[in-house]
Image (tube, rainbow, N blue to C red):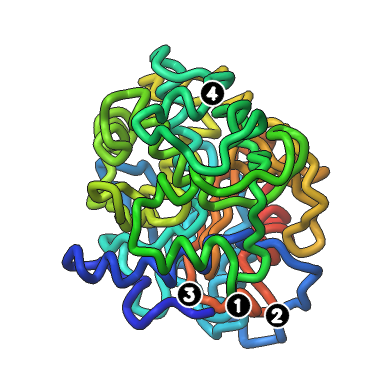
Amino acid sequence: MQLEPGAARPARSASRRRAAVAALLALSAAAGCSGSPSGPSDVDARAALTPVLPTAEWPSAAPDSEGVDSARLAALVGRIRARAYGSISSLLVVRNGQLVVEEYFNGATPSVPHTMQSVSKSVTSLLAGIAIDQGRLGLADRVLALMRTYDPVANRDARKDALTVRDLLTMRTGFDWSENVYAGSPLQRLNDCRCDWLRFVLDWPMRETPGTRFEYVSGGVILLGGVIGAATGQRIDRFADQYLFGPLQMQGPYWISGQPDDLPHTGGGLYLRARDMAKIGQLVLDEGRWRGAQIVSARWIHESTARAVATGRSFGSHPVDYGYLWWVTSPSEIITASGALGQWIFVSPRDRLVVTATGNNDNGFQVSPVDFFYAEILTAVR
């Protein structure tokens, strides 16, 4: 399913944001998980990298000075320009904290926020960590206890009573929910309901005891956004502005929102500039620090990006497991945020490397940034 026309560009009004919700949510499920794709066709790869100028928000350097093969990256950029990977919007590479590649394609620009799709989930994990660092939220906190304003909850039983914050973070909610096929799924029903999203998820029936099985549930991350808001006394977008986006000096981030009361869609509704995506990756690489300030605790970064759940899934030919709303690939230990249509953050602690990509590709497209990250970028690092 494609985004509605214009939905990948910044919304200019609340009505346009609401109109994008159905398409957005339909694409947020299990983004990027697929079988092994074929490689890009041979194209004329002659290209030159665009020089990266230092700015107040990002120091820059030439790739070779940071141990990255500029010729290989230039060839990759040439193939992206030739659309060997479909419709890629941006590619940023950061090595040793230096922005060494910043390329935009197909009309994208540095100043325009782009849909993050399910990369939003990984940002929500950081916000949960900040709330936990502040002592306002705990992994073992019971969800229904935090959401008492919704009593009575439908389909309530001992399993639903046992649902915790940790279960929401690890996609082991126990809800009788599947969004592997969008048509007729709980996700489609949520999209179309024009109702209170939190009520919708809280009332959903259970299938099993929470914490027992991985099932990708975007609705659970929307619920987590409401839980963080209830625990902190701030709607989660305002909490994000104060404790994450503000300290990272992000420019123009915004969320698709819905009910109740313009609740941000924390499962897939975030829009960020590519440079701000890279800040999220660098924050994780630097154990929660940005320019010397500790924004998220190192403890949370380590715990949230460690393997918590075996998924049986893969990104291309690379098996992936799950942490707290982050993917972790094997055996290379790449921390990954993944969103439909080609939104990716790759963090390689071993290589001191952050790579981000945005795009507007149908999920059925046969090659993706996963392919060029492993085959082209990692192999260009010396």
- Amino acid carrying label 4: it is Arg
Query: Sequence order check: which comes first, mark 3 or mark 4?
Result: 4
Query: Sequence order check: which comes first, mark 4 or mark 2?
Result: 2
Image coords of residue 58 (percent x, y): 35, 43
Q: Secondary structure at mark 4?
A: loop
Task: Name the mark nearer the viewer: 1 or 3.
Answer: 3
Looking at the image, which is closer to me, 116 or 166?
166
Disc 3 packing (10 Å; few <14; some 14–19; many ≥20): some
Q: Secondary structure at mark 1?
A: loop
- Amino acid carrying label 2: it is Pro
Looking at the image, which is closer to me, 235 or 84?
235
Q: Could you tell me which residue is drawn at 34 percent across and 78 percent down? A: 107
Left of 193 or right of it: where is 285? right
Kindly identify which numbered label has been placed on residue 85: 1
Q: Secondary structure at mark 2?
A: loop
Question: Mark 4 and 2 residues: CB-CB less than 8 Å, in contact?
Answer: no
Which residue is denoted by mark 4 in the rendering?
142
Image coords of residue 186 (percent x, y): 56, 61
Question: Mark 1 and 2 residues: CB-CB less than 8 Å, in contact?
Answer: yes
Quarter where residue 9 is shown: bottom left
- Amino acid carrying label 3: it is Asn
Which residue is denoted by mark 2 in the rendering?
40
Kindly identify which numbered label has been placed on residue 360: 3
Question: Mark 3 and 4 residues: CB-CB less than 8 Å, in contact?
Answer: no
Q: Secondary structure at mark 3?
A: loop
- Amino acid carrying label 1: it is Tyr
Q: Could you tell me which residue is drawn at 50 percent across and 29 percent down? A: 143
Question: Mark 1 and 4 residues: CB-CB less than 8 Å, in contact?
Answer: no
Q: Is residue 212 visible?
A: yes
